[in-house]
Image (tube, helix red, strand yellow):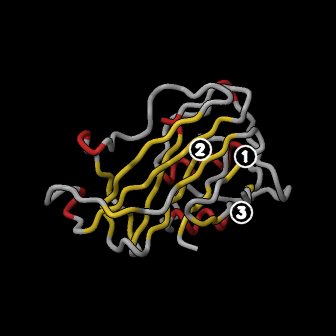
Amino acid sequence: MHRNTITAVAAGIALSVALATGCSGDEPDGADAGAAGTGQQAEGGSSGSGKPAAEQVDELGGSRVAFGEPVEYADGLRIVVGDPQPLEVPSGAAGGAEEHVRLTVRLVNGSKRKVSPVDVALMVESGGGQAADVFDRGQKLNGPPRRAVAPGGEARWAQGFGVADPEDVVVVVQAGLDRIPVAFGAS
């Protein structure tokens, strides 16, 4: 399987992006901030740019990958976001959005430290705007698991979103404050 890698970034730059994408919390025990691959480093960045998160990923030198393709960081953490799937929710859910999607996230901890899935923030954009979160216990859309994943372990979870256009979905993943974000989208 082809593995995509992303570039390294200083913690301060990643923090700015994390604040822009709504991430809270940081990587436990100061996990390795780097990512394997090109050796490029991102420069600049702004937490208040007002630009879509996917554009900010480009500006910081982050990767864009297709849904279903894994992204692996230098410390061995691997994340995959699956293709958006149709989701039925009660009317009026997710801020009045008429269309909804389910996203499945898989986290494989190849690092030497525990990783908390709660530190993996998803920022979803659709049709030029930000998508709204959908929580539904009946459909197991409760967000990421709260239990840390030990080295060698993995976690899977689903999240729901109200979207403007289910054919135009971009998912920006911020895996802790010390990793550069990556954008998943249609190939």
Q: Which residue is mark 3?
A: 61
Depth check, mark 1 against mark 3: the one in front is: 1
Is residue 101 shown above or below 152? below
Quick check: 131 left or right of 25?
left
Quick check: 135 left or right of 179?
left
For residue 73, which numbered disc appears in the image?
1
How busy is the neighbourhood of tag 2: few (under 14 within 10 Å), some, or many (20 plus)? many
Residue sitting at the far right = 39
For residue 175, which numbered disc appears in the image?
2
Going by the numbered disc 1, the residue's amino acid type is: Tyr
Q: Secondary structure at mark 2?
A: strand
- The foreground one among 59 and 163 is 163
Residue at the image position 40 percent from the left and 70 percent from the top: 126
| Residue 170 position in % (x across, y down) | 49, 66
Residue sitting at the far left = 91
Going by the numbered disc 3, the residue's amino acid type is: Gly
Toward which corner of the image does residue 66 lie, by quadrant?
Answer: bottom right
Toward which corner of the image does residue 69 lie, by quadrant?
Answer: bottom right
Residues at marks 1 and 3, CA–CA distance in whole angstroms: 14 Å
How busy is the neighbourhood of tag 1: few (under 14 within 10 Å), some, or many (20 plus)? many
Going by the numbered disc 2, the residue's amino acid type is: Ala
Q: Secondary structure at mark 1?
A: loop
